[in-house]
Amino acid sequence: MKPFVLSLRALTLLASLVAAGAGAAQPDASSAPKAKPAAGRFSSSELPADRDGSAILTTPAPGRYSIRVKSASGARIELVDMIEGPVDASGAPGLRDGRIDALLDKGAYKIRVANAKGASGRTLLSAEPFVEVDGKNPALAAGQMQSGELGDLQQRTYTLDVGPEGRVAIEGQGRALADMRRIGRSGFRKTQCRTQARPVYDAD
């Protein structure tokens, strides 16, 4: 588990941590939600590894998903929004497999896969949802700090009532804190908010 701290200076906020890799922290079973959100579905979750390919990803609900490709030699994946076009890409053919963590609406997306020349076997696709640690959605208050722990594929959501001035400053710190987002009542694609997640490193 990796710690993080949120501080508020005078929105609904979602703070997600990504701890990818072999040493990633695993979610604490005692704090895991009872019902895990449904994973994304692919038109084809297995593709030939000896050529480039693509598949349609269908997400059952809005949320943050970890889209991954697994192969014997390394493959690149690209996330494509049907309206906005390419969104993100990760991985390198023949070197390393890709992983994309993204906030997605409910709907269909295209996943492009680039494999290494001469590769053999199959390329596997998966789209796992991030899950709430406790589901309580505690409120943030001006001048107070909230702290906690997050493992890979975990997120915490906080609520905040914005006053008439309509402006707040939120700071998040953590060794592996990857992303913070404002989620308005109409959804995360309907609002605009600039946020910054700042990593904290151990002193040498």
Image (cartoon, helix red, strand yellow):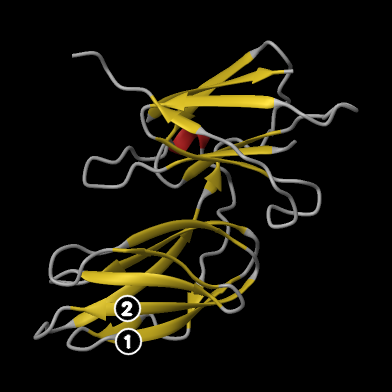
Q: On the picture, is 172 further left or further right than 44?
A: right
Mark identifier at residue 53: 1
Above or below 42: residue 190:
above
**Disc 2 residue type (three-letter):** Val
Q: Quadrant of the N terminus?
A: top left
Q: Quadrant of residue 106?
A: bottom right
For the residue pair 187 and 33, the one nearer the viewer reads as 187
Residue 185 in the image: above or below residue 120: above
Label 2: state its secondary structure. Answer: strand
Q: CA distance from mark 2 to mark 1?
A: 5 Å
Residue 20, given in percent of the width and then of the height, sits at: 31, 47
Q: Secondary structure at mark 1?
A: strand
Residue farthest along the top direction in this orientation = 143
Q: Residue 57, position in %: x, y?
A: 50, 76
Q: Residue drawn 82% across and 29% down?
A: 161
Residue at (9%, 86%) from the top-left corner? 118
- Where is residue 148? Give x, y as percent: 51, 23
Residue 122 percent coordinates (x, y): 22, 82
Judge the density around disc 2: few (<14), some (14-19), many (≥20) Cα neighbours within 10 Å.
many
Q: Residue at x 74, y 50 (%)?
A: 191
How crowded is the residue under tag 1: few (<14 C-alpha within 10 Å), some, or many (20+)? some
| Residue 188 in the figure: left or right of residue 66 | right
> Looking at the image, which residue is at 44% across and 29% down?
198
Can you say whether 124 is above or below 165 in the image? below
Up/down of 97 relative to 5, above or below: below
> As drawn, is 121 to the left or to the right of 161?
left
On-image quarter of the C terminus: top left
What residue is pinned by disc 2?
Answer: 113
Q: Which amino acid is tagged 1? A: Gly
Identify which residue, 89 or 129, lies in the foreground: 89
| Disc 2 to disc 1: CB gap under 8 Å | yes
Q: Residue reaching furthest left?
A: 118
